[in-house]
Amino acid sequence: MSGLLSKPHKAFEGHRLLLAGPLVAVALAVKTATENGAPNTILVFDKRQARRAAQEAASHFMQAVAGDLPGYEEATRALFSDDRPRLGHSIADWPHDIRAHALRLAFGVPDAPTSERDRKETP
């Protein structure tokens, strides 16, 4: 039980981050905000929920834009197994903009070269 209480969570009151931290601290912040009459709905998320949402966003993008590109099926398997190196390898031959956006959605990776070829092309 103590493991769950120490896992990172985030609470949002409307569009504002109320607190990010261990569940016990987040729960106390939610309790205090509620007792003080928080005007907005308060939602609490754990890291797994955020990770799943990122995977789903990347998957939808990849299906819509890259579903017919080589390596798509393997890329999807890598995405949902949370295997970033394998995903990068699977999409290495995709157009740069598609690769960069898929990785950004999946892992929050900033726009950066994603293959050796791109590193050579970047000034």
Image (cartoon, helix red, strand yellow):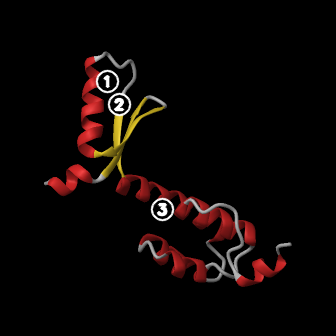
Residue 102 or 116: which is nearer the viewer? Answer: 116
**Proximity of marks 2 and 3: CB atoms separated by less than 8 Å:** no
> Alpha carbon of mark 1 to alpha carbon of mark 2: how far?
9 Å
Q: Which residue is mark 1?
A: 33
Q: Which residue lies at the image location 59% right of the left edge and 82% below the top edge?
A: 90
Residue 55 in picture, x, y percent from top left: 48, 62
Q: Which residue is mark 2?
A: 42
Residue 36 in picture, x, y percent from top left: 30, 16
Mark 2 residue crowding within 10 angstroms, few (<14) / some (14–19) / many (20+): some
Mark 3 residue crowding within 10 angstroms, few (<14) / some (14–19) / many (20+): many
**Proximity of marks 1 and 2: CB atoms separated by less than 8 Å:** yes
Between discs 1 and 3, the one toward the N terminus: 1
Between discs 2 and 3, the one toward the N terminus: 2
> Given the image, on which type of amino acid does mark 2 rest?
Ile
Mark 1 residue crowding within 10 angstroms, few (<14) / some (14–19) / many (20+): some
Please state if 106 lies on the left or on the right of 10 as rendered: right
Q: Which residue lies at the image location 23% right of the left edge and 42% below the top edge?
A: 24
> Given the image, on which type of amino acid does mark 1 rest?
Ala
Q: Which residue is mark 3?
A: 55
Q: Is residue 8 above or below residue 71?
A: above
Residue 8 in picture, x, y percent from top left: 33, 51
> Given the image, on which type of amino acid does mark 3 rest?
Gln
Q: Which residue lies at the image location 20% right of the left edge and 57% below the top edge?
A: 3
Q: Is residue 28 above or below residue 33?
A: below
Q: Nearer the viewer, mark 1 or mark 2?
A: 1
> Alpha carbon of mark 2 to alpha carbon of mark 3: how far?
24 Å
